[in-house]
Image (cartoon, helix red, strand yellow):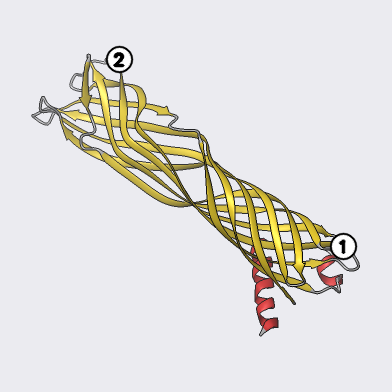
């Protein structure tokens, strides 16, 4: 039963991390070790380089159904660039093995922590500029410029799940180890936009173009990379304290939304169009983790 558990744990960790150490796996005569740990972490979670882009395109028809103009406007806003600190539970599992006749060792680990951090920016605007063309005449008229805004009640980005898959190398001392690991990270995130409405300033009058407010929401997994520096202390042959610092960063992720609209203005004209909203940012998480680990020799 023990050998079966070790085999499954080793294959799972190494297959997931893609770890291969030339000359180490085949030539080492030392036993491998599987570990499982529970603990907690203190995290600094930051949204970096965030941008909210909005574009609206529309066609206007009068009460008789005559197509009288085409318009479009676009712009962007930077909602928030801040960070939050959060304590989180953490679990990890992995495998390590010493090279033959050496204090050096190699291994792989998988860790998970539930961050549950939400960033919110309320009552913001996306400034826009654009133009419209009168289509009710055959004259070749130039585009007439105008400005406007998307008004947003709330923009929210949540960072919930943090998963790391690291390959590491290290050195053992009498009762302690130090190690360095690198590998991919993946974050479970959610983006929400509440009550977005598009307005245009036409001839000094602020006009609701998009009609009823629109809401957007998307849940996604975002890939990145991580590096980890750690130290372990063996309180017995089968129990280990693990303490590490991890820096993880995602690729820049862009969430793209679109929402068609139909709106009847105060003068009876009908606006038909689409709002395009793009929310982009990347995530940086710095974590200090501590765990208590049970070690099984294979």
Residue extending furthest bottom?
Answer: 1
| Mark 1 neighbour class, 10 Å CA radius: few under 14, some 14 to 19, many 20 or more | few
211, 233: nearer the viewer: 233
Q: Residue at x 37, y 37 (%)?
A: 277
The kind of secondary structure element at disc 2 is loop
Query: Which is nearer the N-term, disc 1 or disc 2?
Result: 1
Does 54 sit above or below residue 220?
above
> Where's residue 93, x and y in %?
64, 66
Give the residue pinned by disc 1: 103
Image coordinates for residue 297, horizontal then vertical, percent: 75, 76
Label count reads 2
Residue at x 36% of width, y 24% of height: 127
Residue found at the far right of this picture: 101
- Residue occupying the point 73% across, 72% down: 238
Compared to residue 84, the image places residue 97 above or below, namely: below
On residue 142, the disc is: 2
């Amino acid at each position: 039963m023990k050998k079966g558990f070790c085999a499954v744990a080793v294959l799972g960790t190494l297959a997931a991390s893609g770890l291969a150490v030339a000359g180490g796996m085949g030539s080492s005569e030392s036993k491998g070790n599987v570990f499982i740990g529970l603990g907690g972490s203190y995290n600094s979670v930051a949204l970096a380089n965030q941008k909210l882009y909005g574009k609206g395109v529309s066609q206007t028809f009068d009460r008789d159904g005559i197509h009288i103009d085409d318009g479009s406007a676009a712009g962007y806003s930077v909602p928030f660039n801040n960070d939050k600190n959060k304590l989180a539970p953490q679990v990890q599992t992995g495998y390590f093995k010493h090279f033959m006749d050496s204090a050096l060792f190699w291994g792989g680990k998988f860790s998970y922590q539930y961050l549950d951090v939400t960033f919110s920016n309320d009552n913001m605007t996306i400034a826009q500029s654009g133009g419209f063309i009168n289509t009710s005449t055959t004259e070749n008229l130039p585009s007439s410029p105008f400005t406007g805004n998307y008004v947003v009640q709330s923009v929210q980005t949540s960072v919930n799940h943090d998963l790391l898959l690291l390959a590491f190398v290290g050195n053992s001392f009498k009762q302690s180890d130090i190690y360095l690991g690198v590998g991919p990270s993946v974050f479970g995130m959610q983006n929400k936009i509440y009550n977005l409405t598009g307005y245009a300033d036409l001839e000094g009058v602020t006009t609701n173009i998009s009609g009823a407010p629109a809401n957007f929401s998307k849940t996604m997994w975002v890939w990145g990379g991580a590096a980890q520096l750690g130290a372990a202390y063996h309180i017995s042959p089968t129990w280990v304290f693990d303490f590490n610092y991890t820096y993880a960063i995602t690729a820049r992720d862009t969430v793209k939304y679109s929402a068609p609209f139909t709106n009847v203005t105060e003068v009876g004209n009908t606006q038909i169009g689409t709002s395009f909203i793009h929310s982009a940012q990347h995530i940086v998480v710095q974590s200090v983790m501590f765990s208590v680990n049970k070690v099984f020799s294979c």
